[in-house]
Image (spheres, rainbow, N blue to C red):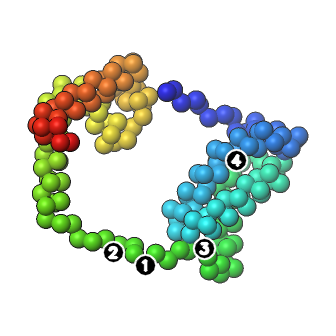
Amino acid sequence: MVSQPPRDFSALIALVAQAKDRAAFAEIFGYYGPRIKALLIKSGSAPAMAEELAQEAMLTVWRKAASYDPARASVSAWIYTIARNLRSDALRRGSSALYAFDSTFGAEAPAQPDAIVSGAQDDACVRAAMRSLNPDQAQAIEMAFYQEQTHSQISQALGVPLGTVKARIRFGMMKLRAFIERETGGRA
């Protein structure tokens, strides 16, 4: 599946500012709403409060779209600043729901010895499987899965066509699977 490039959000903001275009706002909301919520949760807000602040931020975008100035900031910077300011206001007001308390945080049960041994065996098997690949396949898989690069980024970094990157990863993964199934007797 080829991902579509993001729309020109400056143009969408302009449509909202000039004509209160609901379709343009829906696209902005669909893209930025979840990202704002995730950012707020990562910064320590409780999920319910993050949802509320994200909704309020997007409502502010709707109301203040005419005040957006592309010469001063990108759309994302403008929207994230709105969200950050709303979060700061909530902190100043002392909103008790802003942070969630999770009494189980960090209280994971210790790993069982057999799970530790099994994990080490799995790691060794994957390392051996990676060594069985040709260098081009191993490099593409490492960049995709360990360095979390997109296929396009890998293509640019290696200077090879996108189709070549996809083929290297696909065939490399097939080889890895076959190697691991052979080594584990199909238990993986």
**Residue, far right:** 19
Q: Residues within 10 Å of mark 2 (few under 14, many from 20)?
A: few
Q: Which mark is residue 145?
A: none
| Distance in Å between CA atoms under marks 1 and 2 | 8 Å
Which is nearer the N-term, disc 1 or disc 3? Answer: 3
Dot 4: what SS?
Answer: helix
Q: Residue 169: image x %, image y %?
A: 31, 27
* Quadrant location of the C terminus in the rendered image: top left
Q: In this view, does 112 lie above or below 31?
A: below
Image point (51%, 26%), residue name: 2
Which residue is label 2 attached to? 107
Q: Residue 187: image x %, image y %?
A: 17, 42
Q: Residue 94: image x %, image y %?
A: 65, 81
Which residue is label 4 attached to? 29
Which residue is label 3 attached to? 98
Image point (27%, 71%), residue name: 109
Which residue is label 1 attached to? 103
Q: Do the residues labelled 1 and 2 touch (CB within 8 Å)?
A: yes
